[in-house]
Image: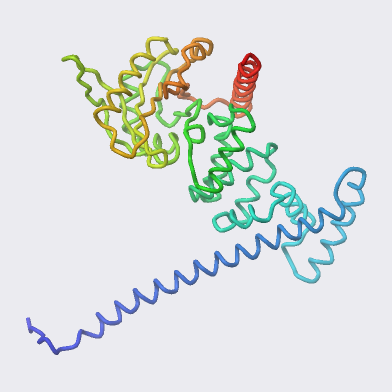
Amino acid sequence: MVKRGRGTPPSSARVVGELLADVRRLIEEARGQAATAVNVVVTLLHWRIGKRIGSEVLGGQRAAYGEEIVSTLSRQLEAEYGRGFSAKSLRHMIRFAEAFPEQAIVSSLMRQLSWSHFLAVIYLKEPLQRDFYAEMCRVQRWSVRQLRQQVDSMLYERTALSRKPEAVAEAQIQALREEDTLTPDLVLKDPYVLDFLGLRDRYLEKDLEDAILREMEAFVLELGTGFCFVARQMRLQVDNDDFYVDLVFYNRKLRRLVAIDLKVGAFKPEYKGQMELYLRWLDRHVREPGEDSPLGIILCTGKKREQIELLELDEAGIHVAEYLTVLPPREELGRRLHAAIERSRERLAASEGTE
């Protein structure tokens, strides 16, 4: 081997290789910036077109007249500007402006959301649903496919947020929009869908835990944003007695430890005392300065709602949720979730009325 002296220039192959890597990076960055810029311009254009048409032709008795105007307008636009301005596309734009009437909110969202993202949420019925998915998509940088999967899995209906009074839910989404602040209500779900575990009709708690560890990536995705695995069967020693927490996670967004207790069967009142012991031990011995108090999730196959309400578990930082090892048909899941939402809202309204 011939050694090169200090003054010997590097080989041309090495120079070309380094230059090629740098130039490729510059090209990819420029392409990404160009794609983002184009998306911003196109999305804002669609919103402005929808706003302009909607203000002129839509509403009430003018619906038939509006359809005629949209059809005529689309034919002329397609003749001048080509594809992308069909009557169907124009109706999407009109709906876009109706679903998101404030340009400031659209301008904030379109830095992360493409036109295809907006199409996935603008036809959702409830404004809170649309705002939830749009803001969570912005914060979590979901792809269009991921966003559609979250909508199809009825993520919003499974969050604790959907069971809160409308004013409370709006305030939390506003905080998410303005400060990227995630609350437990935005993160915690009920039920959790664990159909990916492949469990049969009969299984033990250890089987459930083993299956979760085998499918940890999928389980973390189902838990939601910000969860990081910490420990399995974490040992707690209190008065020379040993206790074990099934699973411990840390949520980076909430800045909290999260203890998970796995149960086969319906919720029992004694589970509260057990979880409170875990949370207080973690708070005293594991929580770092600057972190909020730990949260607990008790996963059961069934819930006894009156017992849970009487125990006031939310005040203790404990969330009880069902888990489903087999995903029911979407219609059935939707009925169950909407019934649970209505019960929760009725209970909250009744409690406010007695104060």
Residue 77 relative to residue 314: left or right: right
Classify the position of the C terminus by image quarter. Answer: top right
Above or below: residue 343 compared with residue 155: above
Percent x, y of residue 247 = 31, 28
Q: Nearer the viewer, residue 136 or 8?
A: 136
Classify the position of the N terminus by image quarter. Answer: bottom left
Q: Nearer the viewer, residue 336 or 164?
A: 164
Percent x, y of residue 138 = 53, 50
Residue 251 relative to residue 329: left or right: left
Q: Residue at x 30, y 81 (%)?
A: 16
Q: Quadrant of residue 25?
A: bottom left
Residue 48 relative to residue 324: left or right: right
Above or below: residue 49 compared with residue 258: below
Q: How is the image coloured?
A: rainbow
Q: Residue at x 39, y 37 (%)?
A: 220
**Number of callouts:** 0
Percent x, y of residue 277 = 31, 18
Percent x, y of residue 51 = 77, 56
Above or below: residue 92 compared with residue 202: below
Q: Residue furthest bottom?
A: 7
Above or below: residue 170 compared with residue 300: below
Q: Residue furthest front?
A: 355
Q: Residue at x 64, y 42 (%)?
A: 130
